[in-house]
Amino acid sequence: MTALLDVRGLVVTFPAPGSGLRRKRVHALSGVDLSLQRGHTHGLVGESGSGKSTLARCVLGLQRPDDGSVVFDGTEIVGLRGSALRDIRRRIQPVFQDPLGSLDPRWTVGRSVRESLDAFGVGSPADRERRVRELLDLVGLSPDHADRHPVQLSGGQRQRVGIAAALASGPDLIVADEPVSALDVSVQAQILNLMARLQRDLGVAFLFVSHDLSVVEHVSSEVSVMYLGKIVETADRADLFADPVHPYTRALLDAVPIPEPDARLVHVPLSGDIPSPIDPPSGCRFHPRCPLRVDSCSREHPVLTPVGTLDSAGHTPHRVACPVVLPARP
Amino acid sequence: MLQINDVRVRIPVAGGRWVEAVDGVTLAVGSGEIVGLVGESGCGKSTLGGAVMGLLPGGAQLSGQVLLDGRDLGGLTAEEYRRVRGNDIALVSQDPSASLDPTFAVGAQVAEAIRNHRDIGRREARERAVELLRAVGIPDPGARYSDPPHRFSGGMKQRVVIAAALANDPSVLIADEPTTALDVTIQAQILHLLRDLTVRTGTGVLMITHDLGVVAQVCDRIAVMYAGQVVEQGTVRDVFADPLHPYTRALLDSQPAAHHRSGDLPVILGQVPDLTDPPAGCRFAARCARVHDRCTTAPPVVETRGGGRVACWLHDALPPVAQEVS
Amino acid sequence: MTAKSTPAGGTAVVRAFFWLPRSARAGALILVVLVIVTLLAPLIAPHDPNAIDPTHVLAAPDLGHPFGADALGRDVFSRTVYALRTSLAIVFASVAVASLAALPLGTAAGYFGGWVDQVISRPLDMLLVLPALLLAITLIAIVGPGSIVAALAIALIYLPILARVQRAASLVVAHAGFVEGGRARGWSSLAVLRRHVVPNALGPLLVQAAILAGFAVQIEASLSFLGLGTQPPTPSLGLMLSEGRDVLTQAPWVEIFPGLAIAVIVLAFNLLGDGLRHRLDPQGMAS
C-alpha cells in the first residue's frame, strides 16, 4: 500500500530574528521522515522549537524546505508552482489553531467557507451557496450561520467553520495545527468527535499537530514525537503510549498531567530547559537533558531504527532514534 | 489564612446591564495548602482571583467577605490594599513576560519587590533576592542577577516571577494559570517548584486553572466553578474518584486522557448561560443530563464526605451547610 | 459587499457617518460643508475674487463685504471661498497621491518582508530623515513653483510616513491565519493581498491620511506664504496670509479670516482622524 503522504529527509532553516552581518539560522527541521496512510490520522507531538508546525507548513506548501521531499499521492510537491500547486492544494487543506485568527473578521462565515470553491471556480454561484449550506450542516451548524461574522460565534462554532472551510474543496488530507488548543475542554471534546466522524464518513486523513499528548493519544492511529527538529520516536498509537522507548518520549509522557487522583507529581520528569533551535546541541539533540546519556551521545547522530519484532504489513513499525536504549543489532 | 465568604462580583457592561461574574462563592485556602479553582472560560474564576487581590475592573461591585488571617480586606483603602498586595497576598499570572519589566535586571525586580514592603538596605535586599533566585532554581543566581528578562527562557522567567511573589513570605499566593503558557516538561518543573516552596514556607495557594490534570498533580483540594458559582468542592482524591455534581462529572469525562480507546468523547451540549440574565435555579440545569423538576429552584449546598460541598438537588439528602453570612 | 452597497450607496454613507464617534461626525460635517462651499464657490462668492476695487481698499467688513476688503480692494470673503477651493484641492490631491503610492509599497514591504522590504523601505527611510520643508523647497527649486508642484511636494513628504504605517499594518495581518489560509485554499499571493491583507490593513492608513490632511493645509499655506506654492493672483489661504501680514495693523480682517479657515480645516481633519483611529486603528499604529 503506498502512503498518501511521504516526507523524506526534510530540512528547513530560517534566518534567526534580529539583524547583523552574520545572522545565525534557526534549525527548524533537520532531516525528518514521516508517512501517512489514506484515511489515517498521524499525530505529531512536541514542545516549543520541535519543528512540528514547520513540518505542517511544508506539507501545506506554505514553506519551501531547504532540502528533502514531500510526496503526496505520488506527486512531489516541493518546488511546485502555479496551477500544479493549486491542484495539490485542493486536496490538502489546513485547519488552524486560533479559530478567530483563521477567519477573516470582515467576511461572513459563508464567504470564508466558500473561499476555496471560489478559488477553484467550482460550480455556479448558486451551486456554491448550496454547497456552503451542506458543509455547515455537515459540521453541525445551521444554514443561517452563513450570514454571520466570526465575532458573533463562540470559539467552538468558529472552529467548526474552519473545518467546514477546509472540507469545501473535498480534500484527501487535512493538516490540523493545534486545532483544539484554544478551546475549553467540553468544546474540545465536541471538535475531536466531529473530526473523528468526518474521518469515518469521508475517509479524510489527518496530520494532527499538537503539544497535548492526551489529545494526540485520543485521535491518532500513528504518532511521531519530535524534539528540536527531529523525530525521536514513531509508532502505532497503542505501541507508543503503552511502550514508549525513547527517554524523551518517556519523560514527556510522565510530565503530562493526567486528571486522575493518583496521578500526583512525585518527581520532575525532565530537568533543564529546551535548548534553542538556533544553536542546537551536537550529536543527539536531547543529550544535555537525557538521564541515560553516554559519552558518544554528544558526537553521534542517532537515526530512527526499528525496535522489537517487525510488524505485519500496513503497520508503522515502532522506530526509535536512540542507540542507548536500543543496542545496535547485527 | 484566606477565607472567602459568599463573595459576589457584578461587572457593568454596555446598556446599563450587569454581569454577575461571581455569585455567592465560599471558599477557604489553608496554610501550605494548594486549592485548585477550576472552570471553563468565563466561569468567573479569574474574576474571583481579582476580587481577592483587590484588582477588579473599574465599576465592579463586590459584596461578601474576604478574610486574610482573620482581617477583613473589604474595608481597606486603596493604599492599605497596595501594602497588602505583594506582602500578604501575591500574584503569579499566566504570562511571565508581562509580569517582568523588560528593561530591568531580573534580580533588581525581585529586590524591589522586597524593598517595596520592607525597610531594608540595598545590599541586604540584593542578598535576599539572590537567595530567592537560588531557591526557585535559577542556576548561578549571583551572576544572573543583573541579566534582563529576555536572556531567560519562559520557564526561567516564571521562576523569577515566583521568586518575586514569595519575596515577602505572603500568606496566600494567587496563581492564575501559572503554567498555561509553558511547555509540558517545563510545566512539570514549575508545578513541582510551587508545591515544594509552599510546603516549606506554609504559603497557601489558590491555583486558578482550566486544566484538571494540573489539579490532580499538585492540588490538595479542588473547587469547580460554573457560571459564577462553585458547584462542588472537596479533596482532589474525593472529587476525582467520585464527582457528585453532574458538571464536575461531565468535565472529567470530556477529558481525552480519560478514554484510552478511541470513540466519541462525552460532550456537554449547549452553551454557558448569559450571566447578564442568569437562569433562576441551578445554572447548569439547561445542559445537565440529569435535570429534573426541582432544578428550577436554586439547589441547596450540602456537605459531603471529607468536608466537601456540592450544590445539587441530587444530593439534598446530605446535611446542609450552615450559610456563613456576614 | 460592493454588490450590496451599490443600490443602497446613499444609506451606506449614512451608516458610515453614524458609525463614527460623535466628535468625528462633527469633523466630517465641517469637511462636507467646506467641500460644498468650494464646489458652489461661483454661486456663493458675491464678487469676483480677483476684481480690484480702488474704492474699497482695506474696507472694514460690512454687508457688501462680510469679511472686508484687502489692499487692492478685493473682497476677502470671495477670496477666502476660492482660496478654500485651491487649498482643499491641493490637500486632497497630495494625500490621495501619497496614499495611493504608499498602499502598494507598504503592503508589499510588510507582506513579503525580506529583500522586498529592504528595497522598498530603505529609500523611503532616507526620504523620511530629510526635513519636510527642505524636501519641498528643493523639489520646487528644480521644477518651479505652482499649485501642482506644491501638491506633489506634500505627497513626497507624506509618502514615507504613510508607507510605513501601511507596512506595519500589513506585517500584522500577514501573520494572521486567514492569510495563510487564503493561500492554502488555492489563491495566489496577489489575490490574497487583495482579498485579505489590504482590506484588513487599510484602517491605520486611512487614519494617518486623515490626520496628515490637516497638516497638509498648513504645509500648503507655508509654501504659498513663502511664494513657493500657489502663484498670485489665484487666491490660496497661505498666499492670503502673506498678503494680510503687510496690513495686519490697519486691516486685521485680511489676515484673520483665511487664518480662521485654516484652523477650521485642521480641526475638522483632526477630529475625523481621531474618530477614525478609535474605530479603525485601536492598536494605534498610525502616529
Image (spheres, coloured by chain):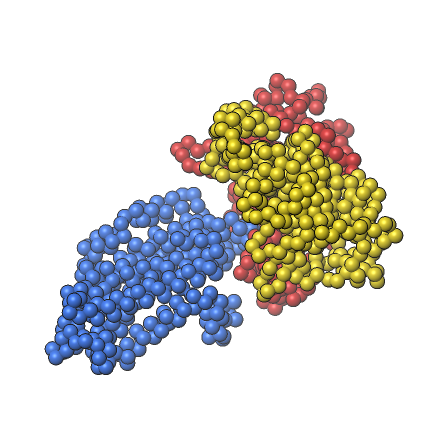
Chain colours: A red, B yellow, C blue
A196 over A311 or under it: above or below: below
Could you tell me which residue is drawn at 40 percent across and 46 percent down? Answer: C117
Residue A53 in picture, x, y percent from top left: 59, 42
Q: Is residue C35 visible?
A: yes
Residue A150 in picture, x, y percent from top left: 59, 59
Could you tell me which residue is drawn at 81 percent across and 46 percent down? Answer: B243
Image mark count: 0
* Residue that lies at the very extreme toward the left in this rendered image: C54
Could you tell me which residue is drawn at 17 percent across and 64 percent down? Answer: C245
B180 over C195 or under it: above or below: above
Q: Is residue A268 visible?
A: no
- Name which quarter of the figure residue B234 lies in: top right
- Residue A73 or residue B94, whichever sits in front: B94
- Residue A210 or residue C74, whichever sits in front: C74
Could you tell me which residue is drawn at 13 percent across and 75 percent down? Answer: C57
- Residue C107 or residue B269, whichever sits in front: B269
- Name which quarter of the figure residue A49 lies in: top right
* Residue that lies at the very extreme toward the top in this rendered image: A295
Residue C148 in picture, x, y percent from top left: 25, 63
Residue C262 in picture, x, y percent from top left: 29, 65
